[in-house]
Amino acid sequence: MYVLTRLPRLQITARIFDNDVTEASNLNRNMLTLIDDVGLPKVVVVAQRCRPKVHLEAVREHFSERFLESRILAPRVLVGVDDIPSRWEVQRQARGWLAVGGTSHFSVSSSSHGPNQPCSGCLHPADEPDGTVGAPIPTISFVSFWAGLVTAVRLIRESLGTCCGPNRQHLWLTPLRMDLSSAAMWMRVAPRRDCPVKCSAAQAFEDSWSI
């Protein structure tokens, strides 16, 4: 959102979901947050900072299926959480284009998923091992920024009709070594028979194995 609000003619109407509050540890990597925001709901802070060009309805809860009782998700959805089951849940409910941006220690993972493409469940089919849940995860401010930046670029390209092709559906980026040719690795996302979302691409793949 920090990147998107700097585009001069951008206008966005959206909902933002999160039930967490701002902590001091967030200040080094959330560029929309100030020290006075500590203790305030994250979604409220972001919604206020993005006005007036971006109108965000702040929903102070985790996304869940019950939010779809009256309204479906927008045609374009951005997911910025590292929790893999949360990605699966949003992917199950998305009916259009979806992009996921997150961090893994000191690297960035960014992907986009159209209705007929292998989904985020195909890319991340397993949750983190039990021993890592709730454990501290090392972060550096510019790594988190790059995760948001490359995901914002995906949204812009999709809205302009120039979305990344199948060979660039997934980007693995290591900002610490941008001097290396291997710092950015573009990859396809393969459909998986064990996709937890059971997307259409995974089902078609499974059917092909059954023939």
Image (cartoon, rainbow, N blue to C red):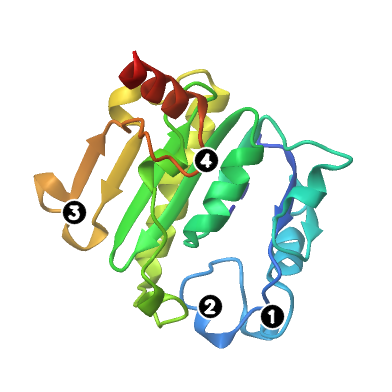
Label 1 – label 2 distance at C-alpha: 10 Å
Q: Position of residue 62 (x, y in %)?
A: 70, 62
Closest to the camera, between mark 2 and mark 3, is 2
**Position of residue 75 in the picture relative to residue 86 (left or right):** right
Q: Secondary structure at mark 3?
A: loop
Q: Kindly identify the amino acid type of the residue bearing the numbered disc 2.
A: Asn
Q: Position of residue 158 (x, y in %)?
A: 52, 26
Q: Position of residue 115 (x, y in %)?
A: 54, 24
Q: Which mark is residue 178?
A: 3
Q: Are marks 1 and 2 in contact (CB under 8 Å)?
A: no
Q: Kindly identify the amino acid type of the residue bearing the numbered disc 3.
A: Met
At 44% from the left and 49% from the top, the residue drawn is: 149
Q: Which mark is residue 26?
A: 2
Q: Which mark is residue 209?
A: none
Q: Kindly identify the amino acid type of the residue bearing the numbered disc 1.
A: Asp
Label 1 – label 3 distance at C-alpha: 32 Å
Q: Secondary structure at mark 2?
A: helix
Q: Are marks 1 and 4 in contact (CB under 8 Å)?
A: no
N-term mark: 1 or 3: 1
Q: Name the residue carrying label 4.
A: 197
Q: Kindly identify the amino acid type of the residue bearing the numbered disc 4.
A: Val
